Amino acid sequence: MKKYDLAIVGAGPAGCTAAVYAGRSGIETIIFDKGAGGGLLSIAPKVENFPGFTEIAGAELATRMVEQAKRYAVFHPNEEVKDVKKEGDKFVLSTTNGDYETKALILCTGSLHRKLNVEGEKEFLGKGVSYCATCDGFFFKDKKVAVVGGGSSALIEAIYLKQIGCKEVYVVHRREVLRGEKILQDEARKIGIRFLLNKVVEKLEGEELLEKITLRDVTTGKREHLEIDGLFVSIGVEPENSLAKNLGIKLDERGYILTDEKQRTNIEGVYAAGDVTGKLRQLVEACAEGAKAGLSCAEFLGRGYPYL
Ligand code: NAP
């Protein structure tokens, strides 16, 4: 079994930053990702609020973060950690490629897209339903699409879809008031995105591909059909906490990992950082938590100094 001081699960912004800080403290670190790394950042059309970058494509920033992490840690992409067990004062990770033993663990497993859970959503996945405009938007050029959700992510997706040439872009939101940043709301209105407020999606229909959705007005109860080719679901995220649950890590009532100010969980040697802790859910926060988790590991493994 291969042995490392530290394993980081997830190579999104939090995991990559943790790798940089741990690696620079002289800790032998391995970082796993079930994909190529970069997390949700890699599918963000553009980022405008990360200090130092006025505007940068999410994929580019994500690639830079992964490349930087690789200077300090062994990177195993496309290798999913299926289970982690605590054996004495060690951790044994079982991945899709083998078993590894480590002295410490940082969980940066991020979050998963929330589902609408309405009729037709599963059936039309990949046939009109998508959870990622950057990944699938291209197929809907010159077509009519709707984005569900009222947060910043929904607005960013809608703006992106309009900019790549979708014929008509609607934002369907269940309330009168949008939750997303004001600057994004203004931009969406300016470029002609149409808002369908106080509406919920009840049903998706079509022959082979998605053709229409049923909307219900939550104030009047009235139903209407909207003919569209694509439905982008952007209604927030849920924590990816399955490894944490298996290890017996304490979660809050929403399922996010509970940590202290040093990113420590209730299990000694296990830390968590990034979206899986459910804090601000901003890139800078994920990186800050990753840095703290990396430094805390250094302290735990006797290679760092008390930093807080
Ligand atoms: P979010 O802010 O939690 O918004 C989710 C939206 O989906 C809300 O408008 C919510 O409605 C709606 N929703 C939730 N469940 C629904 C359901 N079952 N049916 C219909 N609508 C539903 O999620 P997000 O936009 O993914 O953003 C997540 C976090 O990342 C936020 O903290 C956000 O600020 C941050 N973020 C920031 C940026 C940026 O800084 N530019 C970009 C992207 C994301 P209600 O409003 O009624 O609750």
Image (cartoon, rainbow, N blue to C red):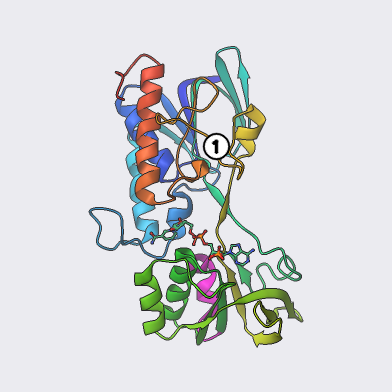
Magenta span: 132-143
The answer to whether residue 35 shows anywhere in this view is yes
Q: Residue furthest front?
A: 219
Q: Which image quarter: residue 136?
A: bottom right
Q: Which image quarter: residue 123?
A: bottom right
Q: For the point 52% across and 45% down, which residue is it?
A: 110
Is 124 left or right of 273, judged from the image as shown? right
**Few, some or many residues within 10 Å of mark 1 (<14, 14–19, 20+):** many
Q: Position of residue 195 (x, y in %)?
A: 51, 81
Q: Is residue 55 above or below residue 288?
A: below
Quadrant in which the C terminus is drawn = top left
The residue labelled by disc 1 is 257
Q: Is residue 29 above or below residue 218?
A: above
Q: Position of residue 305 (x, y in %)?
A: 29, 18
Quadrant in which the N terminus is drawn = top right
Q: For the point 46% across and 27% down, which residue is it?
A: 264
Q: For the point 44% across and 36% down, which residue is it?
A: 75
Q: Position of residue 18 (x, y in %)?
A: 38, 34
Q: Which image quarter: residue 236?
A: bottom right
Q: Secondary structure at mark 1?
A: loop
Which of the two residues, 34 or 112, is positioned nearer the viewer here?
A: 112
Q: Position of residue 284 (x, y in %)?
A: 34, 48
Which of the two residues, 223 or 109, is positioned nearer the viewer here?
A: 223
